[in-house]
Image: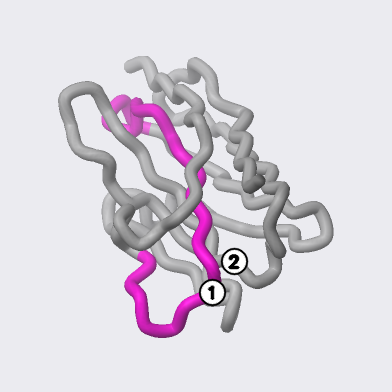
């Protein structure tokens, strides 16, 4: 049974930083692409960042490029999202997602991921 457990969310002032973690179990982590998505109230879930298991490439939404960094530790079965220079518009529930390695499926769409965590709330105050 695949489980993804996020942690590290919380309340932070604008300009601050948070580091989210997602611990995976029940899958071969090194063979899975990992993604972070977020969903704000009244909005659709949107792509934030992703890490390819095949070539190590990372992908970012334009809105977070230069501020957020995704990384993974295959020995710990964990993916991280370092979030710096946080803005109130970053407020959302952040979800970790996983899918088996693919070279043809886009990493930017939530529909292309098979496993999801329960989410962790990030609130940025102005």
* Image quadrant in which you'd find residue 43: top left
Q: Give the vertical position of 32 relative to 104 (above or below).
A: above
State the SS at label 1. loop
* Image quadrant in which you'd find residue 113: bottom left
Residue at (49%, 69%) from the top-left corner? 58
Residue at (35%, 28%) from the top-left corner? 92
Answer with left or right where residue 96 lies relative to residue 66. right
* Contact check, label 2 and label 1, Cβ < 8 Å: yes
Residue 31 locus on image (x, y percent): 64, 71
Count of numbered labels shown in the rendering: 2
Q: Is residue 92 magenta?
A: yes
Residue occupied by mark 2: 32
Answer with left or right where residue 55 lies relative to residue 42. right
Q: Give the vertical position of 19 relative to 121 (above or below).
A: below
Q: Give the vertical position of 22 relative to 62 (above or below).
A: above
Magenta-colored span:
87-107
CA distance for labels 2 and 1: 5 Å
Q: Nearer the viewer, residue 39 or 126?
A: 39
Q: Is residue 91 magenta?
A: yes
Residue 91 - label: none
Which residue is farthest left? 42
Q: Crowdedness of circle 1 by 10 Å Cα count: few (<14), some, many (20+)?
A: some
Residue occupied by mark 1: 101
């Amino acid at each position: 049974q695949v489980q993804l457990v996020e942690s590290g969310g919380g309340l932070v002032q604008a300009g601050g930083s948070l580091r989210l973690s997602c611990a995976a179990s029940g899958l071969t982590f090194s063979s899975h692409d990992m993604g972070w998505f977020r969903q704000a109230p009244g909005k659709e879930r949107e792509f934030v960042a992703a890490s390819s298991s095949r070539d190590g490439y990372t992908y970012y939404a334009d809105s977070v490029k230069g501020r957020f960094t995704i990384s993974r530790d295959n020995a710990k079965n964990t993916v991280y999202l370092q979030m710096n220079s946080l803005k109130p518009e970053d407020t959302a529930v952040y979800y970790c997602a996983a899918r088996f390695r693919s070279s043809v499926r886009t990493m930017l769409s939530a529909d292309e991921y098979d496993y999801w965590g329960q989410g962790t709330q990030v609130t940025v105050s102005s």
